[in-house]
Amino acid sequence: MSYNPRLNFLIQILKAIAKNDTPENIYPRLKAKQHLLDKEFAQVLQSWAREQFATVERKAARKIAKNIGNFSNRIQEFPLGNRANNLEIAIGGYEVLLTLFTPTAFPQDWAMTQNNLGAAYSERILGNKAENLEQAIASYQAALQVRTRKDFPEKWATTQNNLGATYKNQILGDKAENLEKAIASYQAALEVRTRTDLPQEWAQTQNNLGVAYCNRILGDRADNLEKAIASYQAALQVFTRKDFPEKWATTQNNLGNAYSQLGNLELAIAFYQAALQVYTRKAFPQDWAMTQNNLGTVYSQADNLEMAIASYQAALAVYTRKAFPQDWAQTQYNLGTAYSQAENLELAIASYQAALQVYTRKGLPQDWAMTQNNLGIAYSKAGNLEQAYSAYKSAIEGVEFLRRQIVSGDESKRKLAEEWNGLYRQMIDVCLQRGDSSQALTYIERSKTQNLVEVIVKRILQQELQPLDNEIAEELLRLKTSEHPDQSHLNQLQAKREEIKAREVPLSTISFRDIQALIDDNTAILQWYIFDDCFRAFIITRHHPEPQIWSSTREDLDKLENWKADYLNIYEPTNTTWRRELAAKLQQLGEILHINEILAQFIPPNIQALIIVPHRYLHLFPFHALPINSNEEFLIDRFINGVRYAPSCQLLQLAKNQPQPSGELGKMFAIQDPNEDLHYTNIEVETIAHNFQPTAIVLKKSQATKDALFEPPHNDSLQSAQWLHFSCHGYFDLESPLNSALALANSRVSSVPNGDSRRYRRFTKDSDFDLEKCLTLGDIFNLNLSQCRLVTLSACQTGVIDHQNTSDEYIGLPSGFIKAGSAVVISTLWSVEDFSTTLLMIRFYDNLSSVSIVKALQEAQFWLRNATQTELIKWTSEHEKIEQDYKDIILEELELWFNPEEKPFNQPIDWAGFCVIE
């Protein structure tokens, strides 16, 4: 047999390990033979081990296996040589051990080897990173089959800690959910790894938990970072520089990361520089490079670009593409960002393109999307619009792929949308610069209401699938009892089901032609979009082959932002200043938006209906009440078929494609004054209900509890009604939108108990409510209102939405009812007065039998604002459905407070709060 230097060294090193496996004994031997430690060495190791296991006795085989395991541990941790090759040798060693160790023969050895194999795969450099991490997770989970908490608590905790680290880095699947799994694994490990019993292990897991909280997506960002810092500081109680210098440096580096994310750059730099006191290039080259990279990022944030570039270039001296491809790519990406900030666009583009050699869409989709986005920014700065468009297009496709992987819920999707909102805005801007206004509009729509669209699509498809599933079940039953079963019909049904399921991917695009198809020749869509340096109105009619665009100036945007801040600053339902100044504020808003200019230039005279699609905080304002011209006209007066609102054109498209209800009014379900403090609400609901008799169902006052609403028979009545009317208190929670609610009976509390303040909210000036007894937005999302034509929210602030988030999601009570299936929602933009609301609602429902919803509301608002006291008294006296006792109450109010020729409700505060959303 010919001499094989690798085999000879293998035998030598295993003999040395058998005597003394400490690093002090093994590392010098490995250092001397680094040139032999390659992929071929891994193959030699596996071949020799298999031969030994097959020929020697069981006891001897186990002894050899123990030495191979110890060698694999040492080579995995060896700081010198080629890191990728070292890990391949370790993996080869662990995998060959699993041919001897099985769960039944040597179960503890098998579990230990699975744990170590997981550690090697989690660090592996060669191969597909995502697949390596999945293999690591599988190995750790295998180890936990033997390493239970009951039988092997310390080893169970070790594997839980390792599993947490791998979940933290996991690429496939939902990133938010992966991080939650990581946190759960670390917290499980800490049940055993206490500071008293296992101080070093406790400190290590605290450090790891800090990293997971630093990266966490769910929950409040600042709160997560504070938890991360607390975990790092806990770790430093054990990891002192004197006793554990390397781990002290690791924790210093991690603290730098946390403070960097908090924006405390000075403190972050101090922590990184502290870490570098231990992490020298000579002693810890990889850790030194990592810290240089992190330091570069903070310098970049601080606009010290020269220092940032120097730090990144220092890191690249260690992070070569061959030795550390992923770290090399990350540093190239960071270097590209620094060059882009420094306006050195050629070098920025080169760095991003280098990173994309490693960051592939399949292997590292999030990093790939981030790099494509930044590459698009660099191309855009350089004036290369075609390349910018291509890069942004790739980035958006990547982000939408990532979105489809999310299974942890709407919060994760919303946060992803917030993170990437700028990407869509940049793409829209590039489309406009390229002169492609239709494509710009497509990307505007693509960025909006993604969660809402997705859920509605799924609900629609489920409605199609339900009867098909029933038919498939019947066919399966028939085939079981048939003497000569023919599955052809079953195959057809199943094929049809798969065809429907394939449409479950949410609508992500709607073309300009699709949008035009939503309207007739007499309708226009006015879509707003706020950019970084201006805002624009996109006007869509059937008369133009492309959207027409009106653009503001930067000065206009500044005025709009200042106007919004002032409006929201003084907005308070009981603030008399706000109520008194509303008309003047709307006059200012109309001027800032140049509404008269837009009408004159872009809206043809034949247009009779207008659909407004606001953007972000513009959803809060009553466009229909903007003054136009100079003769006391409002925007609503310009369009005889009304002004209505839509969160996006995609939602309009979904609504149009739904089966249209019959012209009959159908069934009504109403909630009436559940807290017994809205005097005129009883007049409102009982009068309206006459229009729907004998099918109207009304839960009055104390009957209108949450339990009654969700229990038979009322839950069926609620979800089968065509018309829902809520006349009660409403509340929008800006801090936690899912806690926005409609107050039901027994929800008012006299005082808030100590210790559970999150459960209670103040809806009115002097009243607190128990959310568990209210109908919250979270509850509404879970309703099935597919039969509903209209939800009327005759309550305060029901049209207010979350205007602080930047995800372009539409989050508020109307979105809940739209998501639940209602075709149209009428809601309020502020706290409306009980008396004027009663008159408006009665008039609105009187109109419904003969005109559309939007036309019915428009006429009612026009009537209310223009009617004199005399006309209102006459209307009340002659109304056939208002009971006499109620007429007396209305007439007394009108005669007591108003003069005969006075128009009591002429101001926008009285009539303009209600709007139609579809």
Image (cartoon, grey):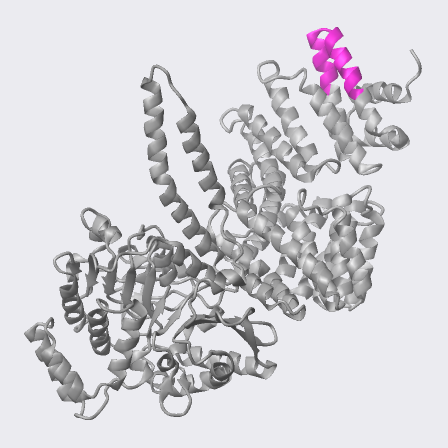
Q: Quadrant of the N terminus?
A: top right
- Between 110 and 873, the one nearer to me in the picture: 873
Q: Position of residue 151 (x, y in %)?
A: 51, 24
Q: Left of 315 or right of it: where is 301?
A: left
Q: Can residue 847 be seen in this view?
A: yes
Asked whether 589 or 668 is in front, the reply is: 668
- Residue 108, image x and y in percent? 60, 20
- Judge left or right: residue 904 versus residue 558: left
Report which quarter residue 536 is drawn in: bottom right
Query: Who's the residue at 30% across and 72% down the image?
Result: 855
- The span shown in magenta is 45-66
Task: Using the image as rendered, state which of residue 856 and residue 482 is in the foreground.
Answer: 482
Residue 855 relative to residue 257: left or right: left
Above or below, 481 relative to 590? above
Q: Which residue is drawn at 77% across and 20% down?
A: 46
The main secondary structure of the magenta stretch is helix
Say if 32 sits above or below 599 in the image: above
Q: In the rendering, at what x and y percent does residue 77 appear?
A: 75, 34
